[in-house]
Amino acid sequence: MKIMKYTMGIGDRFGRQGEAQLAALVKVRSLGVEVGPVWNKSHREHCIVKTEPMDVRNEADAAVSALDWNLPYFVDADHINLKTVDRFIDSSNFFSLDVADAIGQVADARYVEQFLKRHPELLRPLDIDGIANTLPLSKSRTRDIANKYLFAVKSAAAIYGRIEDEKGAGRFVTEVSMDETSTPQTPDELLAILAALADEGIPVQTIAPRFSGRFNKGVDYVGDVAAFEAEFRADLAVIAHAVKAYGLSVNLKLSVHSGSDKFAIYPCIAQALQDTGAGLHIKTAGTTWLEELISLAESGGGGLRIAKEVYRDALGRFDELCGPYADVIDIDPQNLPTADIVAEWDGPRFASAIRHDSGCADYNSDLRQLLHVGYKVAAEMGDRYLDALTANRVVISQHVQENLFERHLKPLFLS
Ligand SMILES: [Zn+2]
């Protein structure tokens, strides 16, 4: 099973917007660019919303059949590890092996020495096509990298082996993700990691490094865009080199776990893809649930009441809701309006506070982030929330499709 050149990871907390999401990809395809859907939902999200991985499979299948999508499509076991993989085996055909927690755990000394012996090309400075600076590799530098990452590579091999045993080789797409960690991987680290993944025989097709800068949930990139661009281009060059040098899948491509809405870096990603012909997997539509909230708020009446209630509850449960996401949000509580102030807002005012439009004076990125992680409150409303989604189905679907197409797919793939 081969991944397409371009794919988009689309998240959908409540599983109702699969068709609207796919409609955005159908629209891009009608304009000449094929971007494959990868429906992703992590173990954490399933636990909070109380859904099963098979629900995502059913959602994907239904959307694909409703819109006659005849290109590949994928259901991602998102950020799984050995403890959580089992429940995803039947429903998924794309597995993101999360080894971030294993980074820095010291690998077996013999394994490290074997790696150094197997890779004399990594023991000296290395020039790679497409990177201006020589990669500063040396025996001691590469030993440090091996000590830092080989345990994680072994962990990936263990998870991969488990899935292969159950599903059979070649019957699923493998991603290795290392993004949920505090320090970015440098291009020379990425190269050594890819060499080690090849040594382990892991047929990795997408790899998700941690990039420089902050990728907070649902809000824009925070960091030096030029530095990101240089890093992104260097990673593309490293991947192209590693595919040839280590016989990795020719489909191997970067996976950007964007945390959604990194509009500031879209132009340089698009340009780099054009310049190099590289593929991309980008996870970016985790904000589908916020499009639901925006639509409910705008609809007024019961929908607006639900939106306000979610905010009031989320504010009261700030620590509980933000805790699991502490590494990927930056909320200044001082900037959060009180629930009583929000209670006075009309629908358009509420919507404009959430909608990600930094040019709008009402936009409040702190409030947006809190609501983004506040989906647990809506999940606990159960049928009341789901019935509101049904009642406002048409307008929500328009918002979801338009958000994905206009603000994500267009700047990335049609610019
Ligand atoms: Zn991630």
Image (cartoon, rainbow, N blue to C red):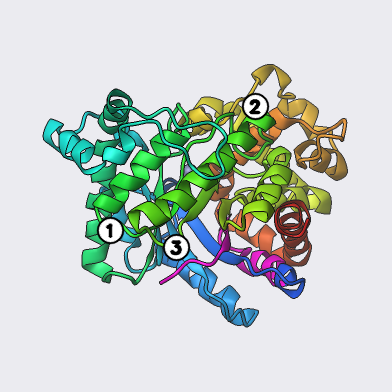
x and y, in percent, of residue 158 in the image: 22, 51
Whether label 2 lies within 8 Å of ligand 1 gets the answer no
Instruction: Report crowding for label 1: few under 14, some 14 to 19, many 20 or more residues within 10 A (C-alpha).
Output: some
Q: Residues within 10 Å of mark 2 (few under 14, many from 20)?
A: some
* Quarter of the figure with residue 223: top right
The image quarter in which residue 395 lies: bottom right
Taking depth in this image into account, of 124 and 304 the one nearest to the observer is 124
**Is 400 in the magenta?**
no
Q: Position of residue 132 (x, y in %)?
A: 57, 35
Mark 2 highlights which residue? 223
Residue located 41% across and 61% down the image? 53
- In which image quadrant can residue 413 be found? bottom right
Q: CA separation, marks 3 and 2?
A: 31 Å
SS state under label 1: helix
In the picture of the structure, the residue carrying the numbered disc 3 is 250
**Residue at image location 71% in from the left, 49% down from the top:** 271
- Residue drawn at x 45%, y 50% is 241
> Label 1, on which residue?
86
The amino acid at mark 3 is Val
- Provide the secondary structure element on which disc 3 rests: loop
In space, the residues marked 3 and 1 are separated at their CA atoms by 28 Å
Q: Pinpoint residue 346: horizontal percent, then vertical percent.
A: 86, 40
What amino acid does circle 2 point to? Gly
Image: 84 above or below 215? below
Which of the two labelled residues, at mark 3 and mark 2, occupies the earlier sequence position?
2
User: Image quadrant for the N terminus?
Assistant: bottom left
Of tags 3 and 2, the one toward the viewer is: 3
